[in-house]
Image (cartoon, coloured by chain):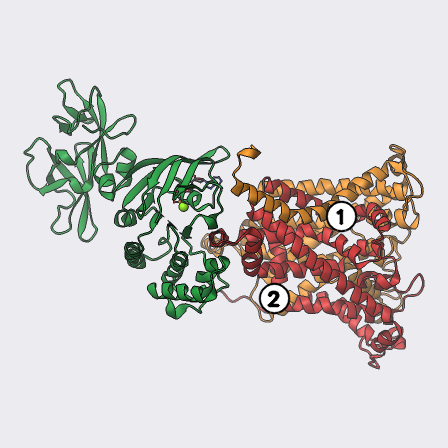
Amino acid sequence: MTNMTSPLDRRRHLTGMAFITPTMAVIIAILVYPILQSIVLSFGQSSIDGSEPYSFVGLKHYATLAGNERFWNSLWVTLVFTGLSIPLELAMGIGLAVLLNEHFRFKGIARLAVLFPWALPTALNTLMWRWMYNTDYGLFNAAALQSGIVDRPINWLGDETLAMGSMVVVAVWKTSSFMALIILAGLQSIPRELYEAGRMDGMTRWQEFREITLPLLKGPILVALIVRSMDALRTFELPFNLTDGGPVTATESLSLYAYKVIFDFIEFNYGAAIVVVQFLVIFAMSLLYILTLRNKD
Amino acid sequence: MTKRPRFGLYALVILSVVISFLPIIWLVLTSLKTTEGIYAWPPQYLPDPFTLKNYINIFTNSPELLLYVLNSFIVALGCTVVALSFGGMAGYALSRLGMRRAGVLMVFILAVSMFPPVSLLPSLFQTFLNLGLLNTYTGLIIAHTGLFLPFTVWMLASYFATLPPEIEEAARMDGMGFFRIFWSIVIPLSWPGFVATGLIVFIFSWNEFPLALVLMTQNAMRTAPVGISLYPGEYAFPWETISTATVIAIVPILIITAIFQKQIVGGLTAGAGK
Amino acid sequence: MTEVKLDRIGKSYGSVEAVQQFDLTIREGEFLVLLGPSGCGKSTTLRMIAGLESITKGDLMIGGTRMNDVDPKDRGVAMVFQNYALYPHKTVFDNMAMALKLQKVPAAEIQDRVGRTAELLGLTDYLHRKPAALSGGQRQRVAIGRAIVRTPDVFLFDEPLSNLDAKLRVKMRMELQELHDRLGATSVYVTHDQVEAMTLADRIVIMNGGVVAQVGTPREVYDRPADEFVAGFIGSPAMNFLDLMRDDTGRWITECGSLVLPSLPVDAGARRQVRLGVRPEHIAVTAGGQPQGDLDYQAEVLLDELLGADALLSLGVGKARLLARVGGTDHPVQGDRVAIALTAAQLHVFDADTGVALRD
Ligand SMILES: Nc1ncnc2c1ncn2[C@@H]1O[C@H](COP(=O)(O)OP(=O)(O)OP(=O)(O)O)[C@@H](O)[C@H]1O
Ligand SMILES: [Mg+2]
């Protein structure tokens, strides 16, 4: 086959290979190889600096993992966080998108305001919120106490149940804008004629939304949902900066737990086993993503 | 168009804008207060007295906070330049140079882009340690490039696909080679795509946390999000300094976002539409 | 000036055979038109000559040299694209000068050659504009000018006029004709517009499904179509086709029995069934007349459409339907009974199974 292709095609292919090589090299070095090495590490015992040679220990770390309550807790925290924040983000996102699709003055400023939370670093966003949540000097407690809604400061980040809620609020604040922008683009691609036809059929505005808008937004919504779910499943700097996983381990996500195991407890190989499990969870999600995209075509 | 009540609409818009800006506004107000003002009861909503002392302090007493911003800038810029160069070439190969199995490669690139960064850490840390790449700009630039190349390739490949191929064919007939076509025809015609992609990659890199946290262990090499997050050490948080440093670190992003709002939104929505 | 020889050229994309066994010699200075329905492989053929598409089978010879593996720029060919394909970020001058610059032609000579070409095409005033600031016709002239400055051996055109509006298309067509007379370069021109093909071509190649259906002068393909496909493709409105059976007495009859031919103008051999082709413009219609000759029939006008100078009549001869083209003044109208007359020499007969034209 190869010796049958024309030199014209061959030159094209060679150029293509040359053009794609740097990218492939970086992707393999930074993304593919580390994953494979993490898998290898998770089946063995070794030290970070290589002073202790690698020895194979089989499923030992996975067995430890299965019996470790803190691991199951972090998996549960991650799933709860994802399960709470995604529906809220979606609802807010749809609301914001419908709002931004209306005609009003100063629309540019409104759109910019919505974009800012997305554009700023999560780590710093989180610090701002942590400051507002501050029990003694934070904005929320100041306002709540002064207005007399409560007579004792609320422990936004120190209470086990409340802390998760506080964390979800920050996530929703930050990422609803992303959802809104994706959905807005979808809204704007719906032909006006459909609404005009709907009006001819005597639809109310709610019926228009139910019968025309939502069904046609299914594609963009699905994409946004899956992208965001994968982000939520690997959330790291949000609990890192907001609560450091606390109180105790009430907000300790899988990423944060893995990080602590590797870099605080220096349990390198056990940490690798955790990240491999996390990788599998997220990889399953990404397969779902790709299958969804396939079905869209 | 029928007239509908506009009052509710404006109320909702104003509410959304206020909620979006609230943490930033509170942060800026904090940075303009004196230390006593920050911890006062009853709480101060507006700075009283208003002071620039915190900003002056950072410039005179805590230059490392400025260094973090500089580090972020170097890394984000380096990552953007490398990602656009490599990603542009790869995107061109995938969309135009008749690569075999281009579709499979695109899906592969999409799939690896979903790897959780923390999964990369054990191995990357070890490799970078052995190669002496920890605490170097080069190291973090390469790592960020790897993280954001998949996005870059997808964005640019789909941008190239919208160009009429005949222009490149005319260039072939005129006697240009593939590299020259890419350089002097495709790049000039695709600059809106490069701008949108570059801005988003710059923001991604500026904001990236886990790799920057782990691969830059020396204080002087930290990027802004990491450096500010770790600034106070283990004990009490000096909010007057933190708020001021955060304002300084987010101003570049705020400016970029405000100026290039259209391009960023266009790029984001195009990227998700794939 | 150069001869181009396509020696059983073929192109396949995996299992799709876009062009098969294209075998033709294009003579020096000839204006050859490739004509055919959408997707028949015209562009693919042209692009194989240009070098934009590799050749999977056969040999391409330009001026006696095998060119299959030669880079486009070294083939001595220039191409004009349907959507102009101008560099939008370069001026008209730079667009036209690009190939010469890449060939390292001295600047003074480039200036001179571009200048003269621009004059020839009336573009002198626009040399410093960008393509976006030009009209469609001007852009197409720049695209042609870009090809001319290179003084190529062979010009290739891929539907160069189809992005222009009808009026401009006629004007540019005439300009192209003039230009070809002046330069006399070998040209290959792809179109699916019959009028362009008939007016510009020295010879027309009609393609169908990746294969050549017929090669001939415009007269030949109109008067003597090689098969039913060509007959139906050339001419507007399209030729009428009728299935004829031979009865025991040797006459040829339509299925409904309303049209009877005492004999065919060609020898049908032992066939019992053929297809008859009659061009709409070859049916003589007389209002209120009575059929007299062997090939005269009584018909009813089912529908009349005035086109301007001409009118189209849908005629019913018993159950058979025929479309006729008649003069646009005082033509018969719907419901009229008319006599129609066919002329033996203008009838086409095709094999009922293969579609090949039967000739003596
Ligand atoms: N890259 C390709 N891969 C697979 N098939 C192709 C490719 N390019 C063209 N084809 C097929 O080859 C056939 C011929 O295409 P070509 O472009 O030559 O047609 P054309 O005669 O120029 O039609 P049109 O009048 O529409 O321009 C078509 O059936 C087309 O689908
Ligand atoms: Mg074509």
- Residue at horizontal 74 percent and vertical 58 percent from the top: B205
- Above or below, A153 against A67 in this view is below
In the picture, the disc for residue B9 is 2
Label 2: chain letter: B
Answer left or right for B215 relative to C69.
Answer: right
Q: x and y percent of residue C2 in the render?
A: 35, 47
The chain letter corresponding to orange is A
**Residue wearing tag 1:** A30
Identify which residue is drawn at 70% across, 53% down.
B148
Q: Amino acid at mark 2?
A: Leu
Density class for disc 2 (Cα within 10 Å; few <14, some 14-19, many ≥20) is: some
User: Residue A63: image x %, image y %?
Assistant: 88, 34
* Residue type marked 1: Ile
Query: Residue sitting at 60 percent across and 42 percent down?
Result: B103
**Label 1 Cα crowd, 10 Å radius (few <14 / some 14-19 / many 20+):** many
> In the figure, what tint was chain B given?
red
Indicate the secondary structure of the residue bearing disc 2. Answer: helix
Q: Is residue A214 above or below residue B184?
A: above
